[in-house]
Amino acid sequence: MPQTPIFSSMLGSSCSGQVQPDMGERCVDPVYQDGNLVSGSLEALIEHLVPTMDYYPDRTYIFTFLLSSRVFIHPHELLAKVGQLCIKQKQQLETGTEAEKLKSFAAKIIQLLKEWTETFPYDFQDEKSMKELKEIAHRITQCDEENGTVKKIISQMTQNLLMALSARSQYQEIKEKFRQPATDKGTILKTKPQSTQKDILSVCCDPLILAQQLTYVELERVSNIYPEDLMQIVSHMDSLDNHKCRGDVTKTYNLEAYDNWFNCLSMLVATEICRVVKKKQRTRMVEFFIDVARECFNIGNFNSMMAIISGMNLSPVARLKKTWSKVKTAKFDVLEHHMDPSSNFCNYRTALQGAAQRSQTANSNREKIVIPVFNLFIKDIYFLHKIHTNRLPNGQINFKKFWEISRQIHDFLTWKQVECPFEKDKKIQSYLLTAPIYSEEALFIASFESEGPENHMEKDSWKTLRTTLLNRA
């Protein structure tokens, strides 16, 4: 993963790329506009990736090409082509008399491999990729057999790669803990919560503390989302190149797990509200979650904020008119204004941009937090993919499209690297992750028991639910 911002050179520009000295803008393949690489054949783009004696690719290009290449070619196939270009250049340098040039070239190839293995370690998960990596490494070590410096660097790089793959594998093995909590599907008709039954307020009554713990959960989950996971959105949708897509070979649970967390939080909010019997306490619960959502907004945790608002807008909660009539809704109205879907969520995007700018100049991790609404982030990438073709009419890859997609993904990666400044509260975390949540059916039952049906449609729904539960019993 890139450890420093690599898109800083792209401010004010939608694409970037360092032009090779021997190419210039006169070349037909690849094609440049105002010094920026915008299209090219796959072969030309691969050549642009591989260093030469006098050239090393821009970090922005390395990230963007390695990210987007999986749409067109398997990682192990790309490694093989890179290896072939390395052999060709190595042979040309060996015909000369300057050994230092050969060592300089070897250092650049190692640097490229180092960036590749650190940023996309999962590209090396299969035997074919590891085999290609070892073959390239073996050839490069021959450039400096005297003191073994190159060999030591490659050994350390390989060790770090194996550790990264092991860590990723361990996460896949414990992915069960990110699955949806057990849903209450039992008969709750005529049942009332016991006085000893816990609710969120008995665990945490401070909106700021709960917002901080939600942010902790968000950052923990988002840390397990990788750039290649996000690129599957593009890979899976491309029917022309899908047979070459790595996404159909290696499945990821990370996106599903994170999306599932959003849904669980929404349902937990609705459950906590609907299962409260007394109107006064239910009103307090609604106002509490409004305050939590507002604190999430102030922190920059837009995903939890949206999940909470979504939970309160679910029909079983929204229909509780007697409860809402007692709620001071001014704060809620402000939150809904921020998440107004009109004009493509213009208000939210303005707030997100403000948080991103704050993050760039922040001196503390607390001010660096930016957690976007994940499903909107995913939709943005999806629509970028749908409105721009992967290839131009002349058959070249539309690299300008991938500059923009990779820029958005890199922003996300930068935000997810922020270390959570809040101390973990195990009691609150345990409740958030394990508290039972009602099914949609159970939510309606609890809602109707709290405030009876008010029209014919609700009466019919309530009658149907009662009949279903009695038959089930």
Image: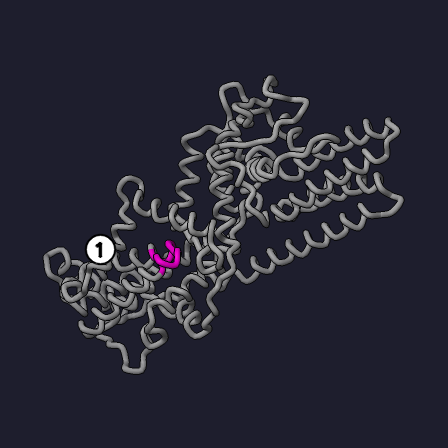
Question: For the residue labelled by badge 1, is the local secondary structure a helix, a strand or a loop?
Answer: helix
Q: Does the magenta stretch include residue 53?
A: no
- Residue in front for this viewpoint, 417 or 67: 417
Q: Give residue 248's quadrant in the image.
A: top right
Give residue 129's position: percent from left, percent from top.
69, 43
Amino acid type at image mark 1 = Asp
- Mark 1 burial class by Cα count in 10 Å: few <14, some 14-19, many 20+: few
The residue wearing badge 1 is 333
Residue visible at 54% across and 21% down in the picture:
395
Give residue 415's position: percent from left, percent from top.
48, 51
Residue visible at 43% across and 69% down in the picture:
429
Q: Is residue 95 left or right of residue 321?
A: right
Give the magenta-colored segment's residue range.
296-305
Give residue 19's position: percent from left, percent from top.
62, 27
Can see residue 147? yes
Is residue 36 depicted above or below 437 in this figure? above
Q: Is residue 450 left or right of residue 369?
A: left
